[in-house]
Amino acid sequence: MVERTPILNFVTHLVLFIGFMLAVAPFVIVAIAASHNLKEVNDVPMPLLPGGDFWANIKTAWITAGLGPKLLNSFIFAAGVAAGKVIISALTAFSIVYFRYPGRTLIFWLIFITLMLPLEVRIVPTYAVAANVLSPYQAILDVTGLSWLIEKISGVQVSLSLGLLNSYTGLILPLIATATGTFLYRQFFLTVPDELTEAARMDGAGALRFFIDILLPLSRTNMAALGTIMFLWAWNQYLWPLLVTTDPAHATAVTELKQLIPNVGGIPEWNIAMAGTLIVMLPPLVVVVAMQRWFVRGLIATEK
Amino acid sequence: MEKRVTFSRWTVGILFAVPQMLLIFTFFYWPAGQAVYWSLTLQQPWGGGNIWVGLDNFRSILASADYWNSITASLAFAAISTGLAMVIALVLAALTDRQLAGSRFYRVVLIWPYGIAAPALALAFRFILAPEAGFMAVVNRAWPGFWDPGLDGADAMASIIAAFSWKYVGYNFIFFLAAFQAIPRSLIEASAMDGAGVVRRFRDIQFPLITPTIFFLLVINITESFQDSFGIVDIMTSGGPANATNLMVYKIYSDGFKGLDYSGAAAQSIILMMLIVVLTIFQFRFIERRVHYR
C-alpha cells in the first residue's frame, strides 16, 4: 500500500519468519534425526547438524517396516479413491443437475447428509458392513420375507456373503461413499451456459454424448483439483486402513509407521523411526508442492 | 438454482445416480442405522441375537466417569487446539496479505503442514517432545521432572494439541488468505486514502468482512478435532496416561474393537454423531444467516 510503515513492516517480516521457522522446523528436525546413529540421536542436546548415517537409517526403516510394498499399497489405495471420487461424483452431479425426475430432491438431500457424518464416528458398524458387504441386502431379504419365498420356491437357502477385509475394494469403497465431490461438480455444472446444452441437443446429441463430449472436457480443472485433494486425503487416512487391513501384506505406509515404535512404555530407536517418518511424509509433500494450485483450489471449492 | 434446459429421458438420469446411491446406502445409511440399532440393543455373550434394552446403553455410558472424562478431554482439546490454530493462522494470513517482499514464498511454505498425515506428524512430534531425547530433554536436564508426557496427563494433552494445531494452522491459513484476497482492493485503497492505517483497516474493514470464514473454520476445526485427532492420539499417547488423552473417537475405537463392546461403542457413536450434526446445523441455520456482510 501507499504509506510508509517501517516499524510495522519490520514486525510483519519478523512474525512471518517465525511462522516459517515453526512450519519447517519439524521437517528439518526429522531429517536431521534421521541422519544420526542411535547414540548421537539420543544425545542431550540433540546435534543440530546432519550426521553421516542418513542412507543407512533410511535403508533400515525401509526394510523393518517393509515400506516398498506398503508405499505401493498406499499409492493404489489413494489413486483408487481419487479416481472413484472423480468419476462417481461427476455421474451423480450430472444426474441431479441435468434431469428432472421424481425423487430428485430426495436424492440430493440423501447425498447432502453424508457430508455431516465422517467415517470415523460410524466406524464400528461400517467395519461390520465391510466384513460382509452383502449383509445389508441379506437383512432386507430376510425382513421382507423374500428369502423365505426363494427358499420355498427353489429350495436354495439364501445366504449372501462377500467379505471386503484385506482387499483394495474394502479400503477404497467406503471412502468414496461421501458427498464431497458431488457438490463441487454441481456448482460447476450450474454455471455451464444453457445455450451449450441447447446447441448440443440441436446437433442431435443425447444425454450421454453431451456428458462425455462436452461436460467432462469442460470440467478438467475441477477434476484435477478434486483428484489432488482426494489423493492426499486418502493417502493420509489412518483409522480405516488400520481396521480393514489385518493382514500386513495389505497395510498402507501410514499404518505401518506403528511398526517402528515399540508397544506401550518402550522408547523407539529414534533415528530409524524418524527415517521412516520422513519416507511416509515425502509423497504427500511432493504432491502439495507440485500441485499447489490445484490443491488450494480444490480445498476451497470442496469445503465451501 | 435450476437448469432451464434438461434432458427428457429421466430414466437415464436416474441410472447416472445409481452407483453413488448404492455406495452411500451400503457404507453410510446402513451402518448409521446399524449404529442406532446396536445402541438400543445388547448383544448376547454366547450369540443368539440382540435383545432390546431401550436406552440402557446410553444410561450406563452417561453414568460412567470414564465417558465424562473422555468428553471433557475432547472438549478441552477441541477448544484449545482450535483457538491456537485459528489465531496463529489469522495473524500469518493477515500479514502475508500485506504483500510485502517475500509474501509469495510464505504463501507456498505455510501450507505444507496440512499435507502431512496425522500419524506421521504425530511420530515427529513425539520425538521432538520426548522427555529423554530431542528438545525437551534439554529443559528436563535443567529442571529434572519438568516434562514427561508419559506420566503427566497435562503434558500429554499439550503434546497432542501442539501436533494437531501445527497441522491445522496450515489448513486455516489457506482459507484465511483466500478470504483476505477476495476483499476488493478498492475498498482497502479508499480507506487508506481516508487516512486509516494498517491496523485500523484490519479492525474495521478486513476483519468484519472475513467473519463468515472465521465461523466456517470454527465449525470445521472443531469437527476435525474430533476425527483427525485419532492418528495423533494413537501414535503419541494411546489415550494415556490414565485416560488423560482418551478422546471420544479413540474411546469408541478402543471400546468397540479392543473391548468388543459394540453396544457401548454404538451408543457413543450416536452421541458423537448428534454433537456433530448439531454443530453443522448450527453453522448452516444461524451463523451463515446472521453474519453476512457481502
Image (tube, coloured by chain):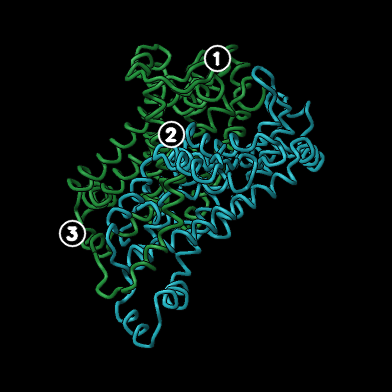
Chain colours: A cyan, B green
- Residue at the location (40% across, 17% down)? B67
Q: Nearer the viewer, residue A136 or B114?
A: A136
Residue density around tag 1, few if under 14, some if 14–19, many if 20 or more, within 10 Å = some
Please rate how many residues cluster around mark 3, counting C-alpha atoms within 10 Å: few if below 14, some from 14 to 19, many from 20.
Answer: few
Q: Residue visible at 37% across and 26% down?
A: B75
Residue B160 badge: none
- The answer to whether mark 2 and mark 3 are in CB contact below 8 A is no
SS state under label 3: loop
Same chain for the residues under marks 2 and 1 in the image: no
Picture quadrant of residue A104: bottom left
Using the image as rendered, state which of residue B47 and residue B7 is in the foreground. B47
Q: Secondary structure at mark 2?
A: helix
Expressed as whole percent of the image width and height from the top left, the position of residue A193 reads: 31, 76
Mark 2 or mark 3, whichever is nearer to me: 2
Which chain letter matches label 2? A
Q: Position of residue A73 (x, y in %)?
A: 67, 47
Q: Which mark is residue B146?
A: 1
The disc, 3 or 1, on the residue closer to the chain's N-terminal end is 1
Q: Amino acid at mark 3?
A: Asp
Q: Which mark is residue B194?
A: 3
